[in-house]
Image: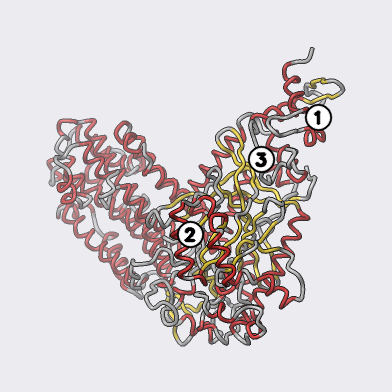
Amino acid sequence: MLPTGAKVARRICSKGPGQVEFRSHVTPCLFSRNRAETFTHYGNLVIAAPVLRALLRLSVLLQGYDTGGWYDEVFDTNGRPRPEAEMLLNIIGSQPDGEFERLQETANAALINLGITFNVYSDGAGVERVLPFDIFPRVVKEEEWERIERGLIQRIFALNLFLQDVYNEGKILRDGIVPEELVLSAPSYREACRGLTPPRGIWCHITGTDLVRDGDGRFYVLEDNLRCPSGVSYVLENRHLMKQTFPDLFASSLVRSVDDYPGKLLSLLNYIAPRPDHIRAGVLTPGLYNSAYFEHSYLAQQMGIELVEGRDLVVDDDALFMRTTRGLERVDVLYRRIDDDFLDPEVFREDSMLGVPGLMRAYSKGRLGLANAPGTGVADDKVIYAFVPEIIRYYMGEDPILDNVPTYVCWREDDLKYVLEHMSELVVKPANESGGYGLLVGPHATKKELEDFARRVKANPRNYIAQPTLALSRAPVIVGDHLEGRHVDLRPYILYGRDLYVLPGGLTRVALKKGSLVVNSSQGGGSKDTWVVSAGAR
Amino acid sequence: MLSRVAESTYWMARYIERAENIARFIDVSLNMSLDAPLAFSDQWQPLVSITGSIEDYQSRYDDVNRDSVIQFLALDPENPSSILSCLRTARENARSIREVISADTWEQVNRFYLMVSSPNAPRRVKESPGTFFADVRRYSQLIAGVADATASHDEAWHFMQLGRLLERADNTSRLLDVKYFLLLPSVEEVGGAVDEMEWSILLRSATALAMYRRKFGQITPENVVDFLLLEPEFPRSILFCLEHAEESVHAITGTPSGGFRNPVERQLGHLRSELAFSQVHDIIGEGLHEFLDTFQRHLNRIGDAISETFFGWQPASSAVPASAGGHE
């Protein structure tokens, strides 16, 4: 007669809990090398005790796990683990009882103790929150990642050419590829940048492009963030936490490293500095109460450069200086995390207390490098976004590697008509907001919300676009003592300096609220570590 | 280094040291009240006076008793010099200079604040004040140790030292002043068993009892004052604090020791040498309280000179739109 454990194992191996079948990922590790282990005989299968234990644990964690018909990042439509996720499931299953849940609690406590927080505006200034971190990693297989990488490099390269063109010759506008009216009417278009060429001709040094995986399993570009994309500090800190949590795994170096990001960013800043030697660089922050303050200070610390506020800086003789305990010292390059609007009250918003009067003078005289260059916002306007595939074809003479999400531009009459008629099926977005503010998710909206939004769109069609509601892919997250599927997106980070570099993986944001499609940190989102691994690694 | 960063570093250290010293004030009073409850019952008020917040206290509390005073000094968020408020300020300062202090230092400052602001802190203060205030002391010492061992001893570190040492000098003088309030102004009238116990509690609250014993053995008020004021080798004595604060100022400016190039160096050097050439008998003869009062005024002037010399910039308006930074 078989022991009870084996019966359970039989059930797991043949059918699996819920929709999941384990046979495929169990087989490779069925035989333990340790002869002292207890073996359980089942038919002609011999299962080593640790494997059996792993199965039991996974079966508890995955009790009732249901992919619910969505594209799942870990399990395929038959409930089998995807090859690139097998290694991960093996590791999780090999944790002692309750260990995985305990590791999650340890990670939460570490975030609080380390003060890895962001500020939430709607809750009033000074309210800090921890960005919830789920320790079940998101896995992207290497072949897929390589395509993403090539696609992003192509896209950013083209967008940079676009920026240089629209602020200088305007060829793409004359050729009618992108309507001139749309570019000039974009609120993020900066007249002050007309005729400027930034150091080394680079405009968008740091980009965080939002990708989503739709129900068809393909990645699409949802948004280009070319102004001050945030979140990279979470990628680095999440990885740090994961290394502490699963040290063995990283020792085998199957997961591509993200550690060289601060070094790459620093050499980028040095690359665009006007003087070649004795470069003094700084991160310009709006201050302690900005939502991304942690990140500003983290990056400054990692790069070993100054974290400065507008009040620390002064422009004299068209050069930038900072106030130190020994008087004024020259600053050559800023990674600025303040929006264009607030950068220089002499040129942009007069009431800005955050910026530095005269900053743009120093910049346009070539005495200061700025990353990103002022004026990049025009290329991530959500209306211009709809034209990016054409922009890529125009400058590169090749098809885009990564597709856009189909987009209706309300500025076009036909599109506007369609959007107004189908509003309840669409996601409608304002062209110039970020952080998930001010958008309408048609299928979840009330009748009144739909009517209100229709009025707003009609009043200012230029300012709105609409996209079909996407079936965002899901990934398992820890909920109490088990796993449930939640929707995720992916934000890789691209650096444009001497060459183009894509940080392997990027930030996986996850909508922690059950059923929610909004992944923004300001709206109940969390994050996961993102692993780029070769398929079949175990 | 940036003036703003130097200022935050200095104040972070000052506020952490202040929190530690408030814990010491409370601790010495708690111990005295346990040993001599009747004699001590009306001694809680001087404790509030010594922190300079008696008016604030009287406007918000009905009467003076142990629990209210401890609540006021430890956890009252509206009292700007409560331990909780000190740590809130220390942490805000630390948060604005995270990139300068080491990651380990920041983590300990953050944990310290989380401990004091935790929802169960009021219960701990009420039920086991001794261990709570011991934890406060320990965290402060831990932060000094971690900063010492993990951050470069550069300009920022010297500003931290400067803040910590000046605050400690100020607080040691206040700690002595508590004793002045508790006991009689004239040295000749004190003595006897109860008194020796009280002086030993005072020494213990400055972690000075063992060190004192090794130097003087027997406890006499004059020697205790000598030790806490003028002992050049004990790290909480006022002379020690001033000497090392002066060293840090000279490390910051590069001015050779013995000379001065700015008001901070001149005033600090002056005060330090005056103290170094004083004798305890004369100080007590002329009145300890008066001496400490004058000392604190000088110390305040040095604080002002530090602001003017090193942090001389106009603070920006606080009307900053929170959403101005990119948050894509």
Amino acid type indicated by mark 1: Ser
Q: Report crowding for label 1: few under 14, some 14 to 19, many 20 or more residues within 10 A (C-alpha).
A: some
Residue B3 position in % (x across, y down): 41, 70
- Residue depicted at 45% across the width and 70% down the height: A459
Question: In which chain is the residue bearing label 2?
Answer: A
First in sequence: mark 3 or mark 1? 1
**C-alpha distance separating marks 1 and 2:** 53 Å
First in sequence: mark 3 or mark 2? 3
Amino acid type indicated by mark 3: Thr
Q: Are marks 3 and 2 on the same chain?
A: yes
- Residue depicted at 24% across the width and 34% down the height: B197
Residue B194 position in % (x across, y down): 19, 33
Q: Report crowding for label 3: few under 14, some 14 to 19, many 20 or more residues within 10 A (C-alpha).
A: many
Amino acid type indicated by mark 2: Tyr
Which residue in the protein does label 2 denote? Answer: A437
State the residue lying farthest toward the top: A1
